[in-house]
Image (cartoon, grey):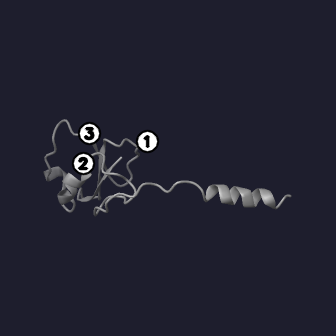
Amino acid sequence: MKHLIPIFLLALAACEPAPPVTEEIEGLDKLTPDTCGAADYQSLVGGNIAATTLPSDLNDRVIRPGDIVTQEYRPDRINFRVDESGVIQSVTCG
């Protein structure tokens, strides 16, 4: 009987639904839907954030190396990850 419980738990775990897969967009996590419009800003990757003008009402954050950021997922927020020089490395939702 002891051996049936782990087998039952494994079978139960296998029944979980798979996460939704979205269209693959370079720079975006394949499993994250583009709920914030990050695809519209992919052309900024490789440019310097300081030379970029973004709409004032854009819900965004710039994440630099070593920055402390909150871990909550906000589907309407655009994240601009930049390197030490301020060059945009990726644009994602969250």
Mark found first going from the N terminus, 2 or 1: 2
Residue type of the residue flagged with mark 1: Glu
Q: CA distance from mark 2 to mark 1?
A: 18 Å
Crowding at dot 3, Cα within 10 Å, few <14 / some 14-19 / many 20+, comes out as few
Instruction: Tell me the residue that label 3 is attached to.
Output: 59
Q: Position of residue 32 (x, y in %)?
A: 37, 53
In terms of sequence position, does the residue under pointer 3 or pointer 1 come before the other? 3
Few, some or many residues within 10 Å of mark 2 (<14, 14–19, 20+):
some
Mark 3 and 1 residues: CB-CB less than 8 Å, in contact?
A: no
Measure the alpha-carbon separation of dots 3 and 1.
14 Å
Q: Nearer the viewer, mark 3 or mark 2?
A: 2
The crowd level at tag 1 (other Cα within 10 Å; few <14, some 14-19, many 20+) is: few
**Circle 2/circle 1 CB separation < 8 Å:** no
Residue 51 percent coordinates (x, y):
13, 52
The residue singled out by tag 1 in the image is 72
Spatial separation of the CA atoms under disc 3 and disc 2: 10 Å
**Who's the residue at 49% across and 57% down the image?**
18
Q: Which mark is residue 21?
A: none
Question: Which disc is residue 37 wearing?
Answer: 2
